[in-house]
């Protein structure tokens, strides 16, 4: 393979494969590639890449680490690996690898010239389909900021998977037959109230939901009406069910509008009512009984129930009753049963399908489809090799039950490919809560928690609008020459970057505490900082003489042999975009990709502050302009993967 068509992201695989082959030839030792570590040394004098492999193998091979390192170094040097020019050994037993930076630069320039907006894409998922289910908000009130974290994480995973070559289908599951919708129906009956003129329906229902839950506490007998409403909704074809359907659809339209503001789109809306009315569970029940893995209990607390036995699964062994009931003794299916049927459909193994209708044309020009109990048959949805459910960590137990139930019921492959992407909830910093008009009593944790039932929380659109207002005010101060409409448009784009990046860059195992000032800062690890780095590159290129700029061809521009440290660092950061994409996509780590993008931005800013472009000597100037052009394209692609607008000015 010629060097100029060689993706840098493949280098790590080649090095690991070569080390693996060397171990086989020298020591007759078989080692898996994932057991071979490659890392970036802490100091540049130890090379661009290194491996501590000799230290790990010294005991097993009964040889000094430095001896093993020397033999591996010599083996690597004999293989003529692309983009590598030198191999050294350092104590106590590291093999160090040095990049041929001019050669790598030439390769990066060539790749960006050819790929442009596709630079950074990889083929890890070629031929594979993944279904990603996210957002999944109860259609009973306005979306809150916790839902934003779910949707931003899910959308970023979808973007990463697409960039990694997967066919991606994004689904938004609508529980239109559950308690949450029933509560709104009960509230409408009890309070006989309609939204005020110009009042958003989802905001109206936010307050109504709180009121009806307070009413339940005052009048517990009202819960009986809730149960009756639930029965009527599930039964269908009656005025109560029609009212519930109207409520759900109006709320879903509000939710879609909220998510579209942030560039979040879907392929399919799936409605629980369709799953019920099309008999998904009844069909799954017969299928599972035929396979012989469902058990009908004759005695004990589950007598008369159909259950899946999970007692031998380590995750459930300490539970008092580890077995999961799928069908109660009265013949009704549990939520887990419905989830199993839906999950089997996602994998295309249920043997039953929805009908489909066009729902709407989304602002990005794509068609949003909806499941239906009648309409058109299509064989384009579901049938995935992998299913990712983006649901907060409070649902971990139920997601574990779903995954292990599939395995125990004979769908082992589907169970292993059912992935729960769990994350912690969102809270507000006290300062941000106050700015949003919430009365706050600061607790020792420095965060403000929320409760939907009590009406304590922050609506997603209120948060987004407040961020837009702050960003717009800052734009107006910096750009008095722009019109108010231009201020608002730029403020919106900055706000999208601020919110989206803040929602994905933190460890998903930690509660996310949202703070306005931190999210909007142009300094530090924020969305606006990334946008600022891109805008800085655009500004530099905008000041290059048009004739000079048009004459620069990345494929032929001269690459200096005496590259500076800042130039080398930027080249390497740009070259790492494909491997950063693949790792984040395969490991489901949007935060890791956010870290990479932040590193790309800071590396460019370090280059900008130390390396004059327009005033450099002519040959150096042309090279540095080419380097800025390459960064601008790579940064645009990374921002697009994060769903963040790339702005030519800030």
Image (spheres, grey):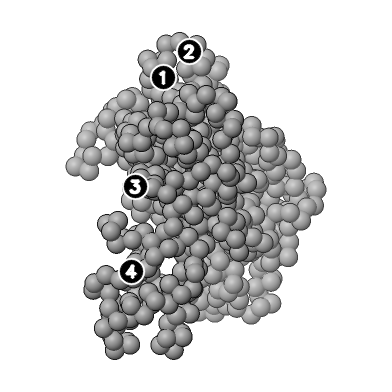
Residue 394 pos. (x, y %): 40, 54
Snapshot quadrant of residue 601 = top left
- Can residue 501 be seen here? The reply is yes
Seen in the image, is 349 located left or right of residue 304?
A: right
How far apart are the two marked residues, 4 and 3, measured between alpha carbons? 20 Å
User: Viewer-nearest of labels 3 and 1?
Assistant: 3
Quadrant of the image containing the N terminus: bottom right
Q: Which of the marked residues, 3 or 2, is nearer the chain's N terminus?
A: 2
Residue occupied by mark 3 = 565
User: Viewer-nearest of labels 1 and 4?
Assistant: 4
Seen in the image, is 89 located left or right of residue 452?
A: left
Residue occupied by mark 4 = 88
Residue 203 pos. (x, y %): 49, 28
Residue occupied by mark 1 = 475
- Can residue 303 be seen here? The reply is no
Residue occupied by mark 2 = 482
Q: Which of the marked residues, 4 or 2, is nearer the chain's N terminus?
A: 4
């Amino acid at each position: 393979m010629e060097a100029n068509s060689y993706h840098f992201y493949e280098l790590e695989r080649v090095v690991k494969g070569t080390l693996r082959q060397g171990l086989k030839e020298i020591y007759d030792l078989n080692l898996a590639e994932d057991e071979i570590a490659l890392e970036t040394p802490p100091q540049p004098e130890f090379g661009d890449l290194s491996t501590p492999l000799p230290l790990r193998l010294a005991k097993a091979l009964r040889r000094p680490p430095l001896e093993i390192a020397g033999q591996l170094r010599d083996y690597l040097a004999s293989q003529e690996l692309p983009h590598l020019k030198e191999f050294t050994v350092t104590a106590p037993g590291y093999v160090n690898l040095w990049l041929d930076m001019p050669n790598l630069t030439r390769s990066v320039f060539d790749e960006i010239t050819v790929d442009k907006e596709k630079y950074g894409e990889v083929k890890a998922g070629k031929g594979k389909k993944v279904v990603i289910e996210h957002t999944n908000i109860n259609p009973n009130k306005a979306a809150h900021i916790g839902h934003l974290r779910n949707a931003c994480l899910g959308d970023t995973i979808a973007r990463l998977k697409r960039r990694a070559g997967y066919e991606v289908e994004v689904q938004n599951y609508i529980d239109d037959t559950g308690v949450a919708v029933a509560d709104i129906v009960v509230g409408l009956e009890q309070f006989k109230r309609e939204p005020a003129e110009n009042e958003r329906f989802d905001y109206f229902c936010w307050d109504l939901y709180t009121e009806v839950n307070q009413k339940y506490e005052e009048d517990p007998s009202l819960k009986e009406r809730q149960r009756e409403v639930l029965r009527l909704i599930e039964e269908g074809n009656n005025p109560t069910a029609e009212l519930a359907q109207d409520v759900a659809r109006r709320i879903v339209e509000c939710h879609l509008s909220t998510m579209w503001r942030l560039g979040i789109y879907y392929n399919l809306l799936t409605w629980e009512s369709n799953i019920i009315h099309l008999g998904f569970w009844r069909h799954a029940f017969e299928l599972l009984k035929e396979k012989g893995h469902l058990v009908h209990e004759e005695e004990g607390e589950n007598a008369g129930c159909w259950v899946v036995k999970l007692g031998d699964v380590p995750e459930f062994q300490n539970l008092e009753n580890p077995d999961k009931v799928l069908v109660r003794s009265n013949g009704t299916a549990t939520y887990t049963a419905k989830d199993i049927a839906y999950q089997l459909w996602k994998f295309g193994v249920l043997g039953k399908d929805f009908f489909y209708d066009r729902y709407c044309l989304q602002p990005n020009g794509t068609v949003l489809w909806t499941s239906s109990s009648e309409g058109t048959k299509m064989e384009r949805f579901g049938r995935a090799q992998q299913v990712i459910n983006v649901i907060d960590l409070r649902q971990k137990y139920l997601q574990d039950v779903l995954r292990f139930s599939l395995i125990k019921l004979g769908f082992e492959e589907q169970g292993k490919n059912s992935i729960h992407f769990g994350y912690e909830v969102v809270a507000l910093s006290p300062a941000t809560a106050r700015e949003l008009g919430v009365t706050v009593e600061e607790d020792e944790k420095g965060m403000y928690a929320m409760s939907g039932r009590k009406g304590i929380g922050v609506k997603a659109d209120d948060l987004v609008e407040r961020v837009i207002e702050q960003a717009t005010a800052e734009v107006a101060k910096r750009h008095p020459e722009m019109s108010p409409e231009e201020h608002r448009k730029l403020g919106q784009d900055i706000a999208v970057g601020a919110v989206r990046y803040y929602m994905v860059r933190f460890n998903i195992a930690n509660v996310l505490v949202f703070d306005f000032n931190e999210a909007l800062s142009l300094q530090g690890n924020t969305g606006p900082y990334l946008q600022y780095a891109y805008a800085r590159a655009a500004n530099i290129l905008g000041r290059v003489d048009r004739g000079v700029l048009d004459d620069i061809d990345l494929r032929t521009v001269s690459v200096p042999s005496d590259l500076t440290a800042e130039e080398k660092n930027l080249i390497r950061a740009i070259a790492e975009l494909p491997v950063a994409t693949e790792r984040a996509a395969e490991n489901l780590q949007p935060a890791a990709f956010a870290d990479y993008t932040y590193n790309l931005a800071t590396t460019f800013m370090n280059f900008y502050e130390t390396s004059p472009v327009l005033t450099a000597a002519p040959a150096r100037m042309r090279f540095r302009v080419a380097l800025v052009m390459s960064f601008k394209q790579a940064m645009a692609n990374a921002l697009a993967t994060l769903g963040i607008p790339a702005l030519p000015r800030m």
